[in-house]
């Protein structure tokens, strides 16, 4: 069990949790260390336990989820976080919470997309589903403020940022621009460093403010 990835599931619907357990049952490299329907109970259940990945639904009380993540990181500094977002979520998109996330997918994602997301975040790649990116863009378009024309990015970085905001994955961007995925990830890191942003959410807001994508 020591070589397995310890996973914590936090979701308010037991049937949904059972579905996740079913998806994982044939995977040899993962172990569900606990599942809870309540954030507070999850904190109690995971005291002094090492967690590799937490799969948690986004609830309107972001503070509770943030507290859980802070608690888990005290024992698991390399914790990966996969957030599950409801399709009709109408709450505030908490940027500090999203900055912590390694991946975000819709709660009603397909089995294939769910497993892809899990595999990607476990190897420390970010994973935002196309539907989630679209939802984030639409929410931030509502209250954007335009700024000066962008000047800090290279032409290639500008091109890649625009494709990120158009919901292309790193692999799709690589294929579209005829470059390697590693090159795309390097450019992505340069964009983050130059803009001093920490997440895809921040990049999307930056792109909207600077009219990189249409609003």
Image (cartoon, helix red, strand yellow):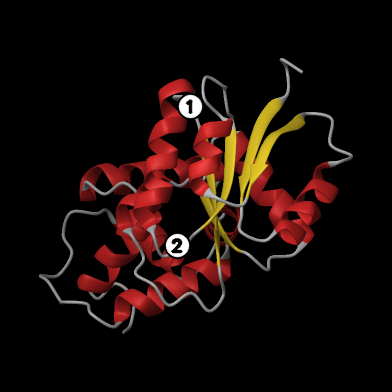
Residue 54 placement (x, y as % from top left): 57, 41
Query: Would residue 207 appear left or right of 104 to someone viewing this image?
Result: left
Front in this rendered view, residue 33 or 165: 33
Q: Residue at x 36, y 48 (%)?
A: 99
First-in-chain label (2 vs 1): 1
The Cα–Cα distance between marks 2 and 1, rounded to whole angstroms, is 25 Å
Considering only vertical position in the picture, is 146 above or below 8? below
Q: Residue at x 58, y 32 (%)?
A: 45
Q: Nearer the viewer, mark 2 or mark 1?
A: 1
Q: Secondary structure at mark 1?
A: loop
The answer, for residue 3, to whether it is visible in the render is yes
Q: Quadrant of residue 91?
A: bottom left
Looking at the rendered image, the quarter that the C terminus falls into is bottom left
Tell me the crowding category of disc 2: few under 14, some 14 to 19, or many 20 or more residues within 10 angstroms, Cα based: many
Residue 190 placement (x, y as % from top left): 32, 43
Q: Secondary structure at mark 2?
A: helix
Looking at the rendered image, the quarter that the N terminus falls into is top right
The answer, for residue 125, to whether it is visible in the render is no
Query: Would residue 183 appear left or right of 37 to someone viewing this image?
Result: left
Q: Residue at x 59, y 36 (%)?
A: 53
Whether tag 2 and tag 1 are in contact, CB under 8 A, the answer is no
Q: On the image, numbered disc 1 is attached to which residue?
A: 78
Q: Residue at x 41, y 65 (%)?
A: 60
Q: On the image, numbered disc 2 is attached to which residue?
A: 164
Front in this rendered view, residue 146 or 108: 108
Residue 80 placement (x, y as % from top left): 53, 37
Query: Would residue 14 appear left or right of 175 to someone viewing this image?
Result: right
């Amino acid at each position: 069990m020591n070589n397995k990835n310890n996973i914590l599931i936090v979701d308010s619907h037991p049937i949904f949790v059972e579905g996740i357990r079913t998806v994982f049952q044939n995977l040899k490299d993962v172990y569900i260390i606990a599942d809870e329907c309540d954030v507070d109970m999850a904190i109690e259940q995971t005291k002094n336990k090492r967690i590799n990945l937490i799969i948690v639904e986004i609830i309107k009380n972001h503070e509770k989820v943030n507290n859980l993540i802070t608690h888990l990181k005290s024992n698991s500094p390399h914790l990966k976080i996969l957030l599950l977002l409801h399709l009709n979520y109408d709450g505030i998109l908490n940027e500090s919470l999203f900055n912590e996330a390694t991946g975000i997918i819709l709660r009603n994602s397909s089995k294939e997309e769910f497993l892809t997301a899990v595999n990607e975040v476990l190897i420390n790649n970010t994973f935002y589903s196309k539907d989630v990116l679209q939802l984030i863009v639409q929410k931030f378009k509502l209250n954007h403020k335009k700024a000066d024309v962008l000047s800090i990015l290279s032409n290639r970085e500008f091109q890649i940022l625009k494709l990120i905001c158009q919901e292309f994955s790193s692999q799709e961007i690589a294929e579209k621009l005829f470059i390697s995925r590693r090159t795309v990830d390097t450019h992505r890191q340069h964009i983050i460093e130059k803009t001093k942003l920490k997440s895809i959410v921040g990049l999307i807001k930056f792109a909207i403010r600077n009219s990189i994508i249409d609003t």
